[in-house]
Amino acid sequence: MTIVAATEEIDRSTPIPLYYQVSQILRKEIESGRYKPGDYIPTEMELQKRFSVSRATIRQAIADLVYQGLLERRRSKGTTVSATQYEARLSDLASFTNEMMNSGFTLRTQVLSFKHMVVPESIADFLGLKTSEMIYAMERLRLVDDKPVSVEKWYAPGKVFPGLDRSFFGETGFEQSTYYVLMKRYGVVINRAVDTVSPLGVESREAKLLKVEPGTPVLLRSRISYGSDNQPVSYAVGVYLIRLRFLLEASRSHTIR
């Protein structure tokens, strides 16, 4: 696919959508340093005038860059270049904690709630449980370099992890990783996992926690993790303000949590 250079204007003679051409020009200008992290980009009206396109085209181009993590919308202030570009890979069975720490970021986790409860019907199938069985349910806010990037809900069968306690999970270090805690406390090693990823607009509650506008593009990611006996040991679902780099290999499960 053709990438429009930063010094070019849009080409109306090609079948490439106008919004995509605009987004690629802005991307090039961001990557070249014309707009630095924290800088405000031109207003929608200024971009309309520059490219001679509709407001809807400009909004779609900006939304595309927001979704990719290059831009951030600020309430009543405008759109700025993201201060840090967070990227996670969908490959191997690396934990989200390891992925961020190995990339040089500072990861911190806030446990918002922790419950021992009867499994909801909507969760039971993912864990292979009867609706009368007990589970542990935890909600967490993940912060990278003190910026909230994810709200996660995590579930695990009570019968597999008796006595699991909120105090087992730390705010910093490897104790943030559910995989690490399950291995350290129960000797459970994750053998494989299955992820589902889809885009959506974040809802108001999660938007408030992530400090973004409701409707901001995020990734909805769910994961079922399996132990060495090929039985599900946890199910997690969350919204993420990070980009994913897909590394596809037919012989592996390409996952991260």
Image (cartoon, grey):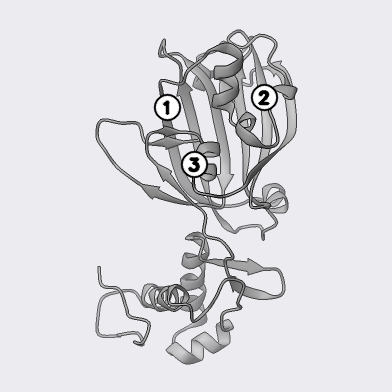
What is the quadrant of residue 213 in the picture?
bottom right
Quadrant where the N terminus is found in the figure: bottom left
* Residue 183: quarter of image: top right
Circle 3: is it few (<14), some (14-19), or many (20+) Cα within 10 Å? some
Q: Nearer the viewer, mark 3 or mark 2?
A: 3
User: Left or right of 166: which side holds 105?
Assistant: left
Q: Secondary structure at mark 2?
A: strand
Question: Of label 2 and label 1, which has the lower sequence position?
Answer: 2
Q: Amino acid at mark 2?
A: Ala
Count of numbered labels shown in the rendering: 3
Q: Position of residue 132 (x, y in %)?
A: 64, 9
- Where's residue 256, x and y in %? 46, 37
Residue at 61% x, 7% y is 159
Q: Which mark is residue 10?
A: none
Query: As displayed, is residue 94 above or below residue 7?
Result: above
- In this image, 156 relative to 167: left or right? left
Secondary structure, mark 3, is: helix
Q: Residue at x 29, y 42 (%)?
A: 248
Q: Residue 120, how many percent across, how many down? A: 63, 21
* Rendered image: mark on residue 137: 2
Q: Counting residues from the N terminus, which is met first, the one under dot 3 or under dot 1?
A: 3
Residue 193, labelled with which disc? 1
Q: Amino acid at mark 1?
A: Ala
